[in-house]
DNA sequence: AAATTTCTGATTTACGTACATCAGAAATTC
DNA sequence: GAATTTCTGATGTACGTAAATCAGAAATTT
């Protein structure tokens, strides 16, 4: 059997109360006694039984996810995954909630962060927009002792505890590399559709893509980046216009969330010959892959990200270390042949993470 | 607060003991009383607090992983992941152990299954070899009430509860599809290196690969399958011989574990022009991707598989349902540009799954 | 040496569930 | 209606930890 607090007390020759004080960093223990207890803990290889501890504490952890509003399918999927995780979150003593704010709006995000801090939550996960207001809001949260993780789009250099999302530079590089291989020697320029350069993930993906394309043996023209604001209508018209103006367009990299408009424009123009690489496996991009309009989709698993965020925030709230390797989010590559089955309906009885 | 057994007792107007009898399916409750209690449970939306239940039971679940022995790097990684998971398995009240048996040996596997059943374990995960002995051993395990999952290689049609691994037909199709795109119009035959057709995963991958290749616009000769028994030396000589005899070889699909020998043979022949697609991201295939000898690696995440197997076996042991969607193992595609960072050293302090 | 402060021990209750025991009520059989 | 069987209630202990209380020991100050 694994050792308990009682074993520590026996081994160290102190009382249970003293062990408790040492374990939970409470005052009222002399340095020598504390050392004795710590020695016993180390000798026995004691590890706290978190289940029992949480039971005794009956503590709950209210965690807030701040996501951009609007019809960005990936963000809505993230929201759905938060709700899904919330169904069995009671077992892990977490209470998840979602707050939505206007997309690409640093001031609104900062206000939402401050509001969450005021509500005294145990942790915040947010899709970061770049801006000084956001930096200082994160600093205020951390100063108030509230763990903070960035989700999907990072804000390196800020006070955030952790970033949960893919390496976006590598994602862009992967897109560029696949595009190069798929196009091979076929001539023609490549277009890029982004949402906004005010979120770092888009900027980073572009950076990686350009780097990979410029490393190709065959030099290829990259058209100026189209900014569709992750809006279906705007994305549609931008792409439709581009297709009309550039008849020999060879490739199209969609690094944001404008895929609905993009696919509609491609279908309308009947251009199945363009090599299309998009991000995030949603209903639209899945249909695009199946119909052959889209050649590859780079994806980050929303469910994994939500569960990872919950784990990290809980660990930070408890002052526990995080296994960075385990929390690394993988970049999935999907082509027509390795599409996963359609996700099933929510099953509240399911336990565990993934 | 979420409801407890006490709330049910109050609501149903019965005692705690009766609620307990209903919840745990113990005898001694009239049908009418049972119905009252069940109504109260449904009305309150009660869900058992598993943490408290496990604490009270102080039950442990001994789970056994039966893996092929030998220097198959992926199997050794699986073994390492089992040990890694075992480090914090105490928290989940599981006790993991690994048993190795000769590879491709149905009788040895069946014997190991019987031995595990005799030891009265709570669950068994095994890399299935095809054979009648294995079928009947699985049936004996299930008859003895021991949950059984197949790992990596399935045995559909057997009594196993669940399969933990990728869809190997889709994996083969993906390999074929990528091979076709990467080769484009380049002429030349393609070779396939397998381990043994006695494990179904190899057979299924081959099936998918051939299907995808035959669906290509450009017809391409596929050489007879080379069976390397997952042995580095044998694989080396088979590939070396093949490279010598087929100078215009265009592609090479390695669907088993003979990658060390394969890469050595390619390097020795200086053939960086052959399009190579291999399975499982190991030290060898990673180095191959980085050096450019290997073009793509299809991977299943050993850590995910182990954690999924543990979750499924525990759920089966407790008679709980399994969320199949959540337990589906993804097929990862790795190219040079989306290689994850080298795995870190084991960190026993890490909590949670992924 | 007395008074004070700081530390430590002993004990208790609680968290939510599992499980066992025993007495008594209700239903069934004779 | 008595005897029996089957069901139900009441109660208690246990799991491993958290947290509180209070008494007493040790160290410190006066």
Image (cartoon, coloured by chain):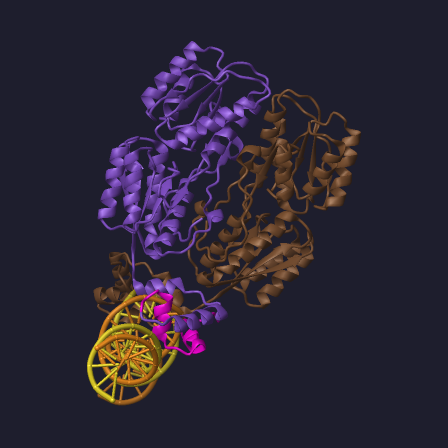
Chain colours: A purple, B brown, C yellow, D orange
Quadrant into which the N terminus of chain B falls: bottom left
Residue at 52%, 30% (x, y): give it. A174
* Camera sees residue A65: no
Position of B39 compared to B331: left or right? Answer: left
Q: Position of residue A146 (x, y in %)?
A: 30, 49
Decide: is B353 above or below A29: above
Q: How many numbered marks are there?
A: 0
Q: Quadrant of residue A205?
A: top left
Residue at 63%, 24% (x, y): give it. B183
Q: Quadrant of residue B241?
A: top right
Q: Nearer the viewer, residue A147 or B279?
A: A147
Decide: is B285 above or below A184: below
Residue at 40%, 32% (x, y): give it. A201
Decide: is B191 above or below B103: above
Q: Nearer the viewer, residue B239 or A111?
A: A111
Q: Position of residue C21 (x, y in %)?
A: 36, 83
Q: Position of residue A204 (x, y in %)?
A: 43, 30
* Camera sees residue A84: yes
Q: Position of residue B31 (x, y in %)?
A: 30, 66
Position of A115 compared to B49: left or right? Answer: left
Question: Is residue A16 magenta-colored?
Answer: yes
Q: Quadrant of residue A68?
A: top left
Position of B256 compared to B240: left or right? Answer: left
Position of B242 compared to B201: left or right? Answer: right
Q: Nearer the viewer, residue A133 or B38?
A: A133
Question: Is residue A25 magenta-colored?
Answer: yes
Decide: is B328 above or below A31: above
**Range covered by the magenta-colored residues:** A1-27
């Amino acid at each position: 059997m694994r050792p308990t607090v009682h074993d520590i007390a026996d081994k160290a020759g102190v009382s249970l109360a003293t062990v408790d004080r040492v374990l939970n960093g409470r005052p009222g223990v002399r340095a020598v006694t504390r050392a004795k207890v710590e020695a016993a803990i180390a000798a026995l290889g004691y590890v706290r039984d978190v289940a029992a501890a949480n039971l005794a504490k009956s503590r709950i952890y209210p965690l807030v996810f701040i996501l951009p509003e609007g019809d960005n399918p990936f963000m809505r999927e993230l929201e759905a995954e938060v709700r899904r995780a919330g169904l069995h979150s009671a077992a892990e003593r977490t209470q998840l909630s979602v707050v939505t704010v206007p997309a690409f709006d640093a001031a609104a995000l900062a206000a939402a962060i401050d509001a969450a801090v005021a509500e005294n939550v145990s942790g915040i996960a947010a899709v970061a927009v770049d801006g000084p207001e956001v930096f200082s809001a994160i600093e205020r949260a951390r100063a108030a002792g509230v763990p903070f993780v960035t989700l999907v789009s990072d804000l390196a250099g800020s006070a955030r505890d952790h970033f949960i999302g893919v390496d976006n530079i590598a994602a862009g590089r992967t897109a560029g590399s696949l595009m190069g291989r798929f196009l091979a020697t076929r001539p023609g320029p490549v277009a890029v559709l982004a949402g906004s350069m005010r979120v770092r993930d888009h900027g980073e993906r572009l950076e990686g893509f350009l780097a990979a394309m410029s490393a190709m043996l065959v030099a290829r023209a990259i058209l100026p980046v189209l900014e569709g604001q992750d809006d279906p209508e705007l994305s549609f018209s931008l792409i439709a216009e581009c297709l009309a103006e550039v008849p020999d367009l060879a490739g199209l990299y969609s690094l944001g969330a404008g895929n609905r408009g993009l696919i509609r424009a491609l279908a309308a123009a009947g251009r199945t010959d363009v090599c299309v690489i998009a991000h995030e496996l949603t209903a639209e991009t899945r249909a695009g892959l199946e119909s052959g309009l889209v050649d590859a989709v780079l994806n980050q698993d929303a469910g994994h990200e939500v569960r990872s965020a919950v784990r990290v925030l809980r660990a930070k709230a408890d002052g526990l270390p995080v296994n960075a390797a385990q929390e690394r989010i993988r970049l999935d590559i999907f082509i027509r042949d390795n599409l996963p089955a359609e996700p099933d309906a929510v099953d509240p009885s399911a336990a565990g993470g993934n």
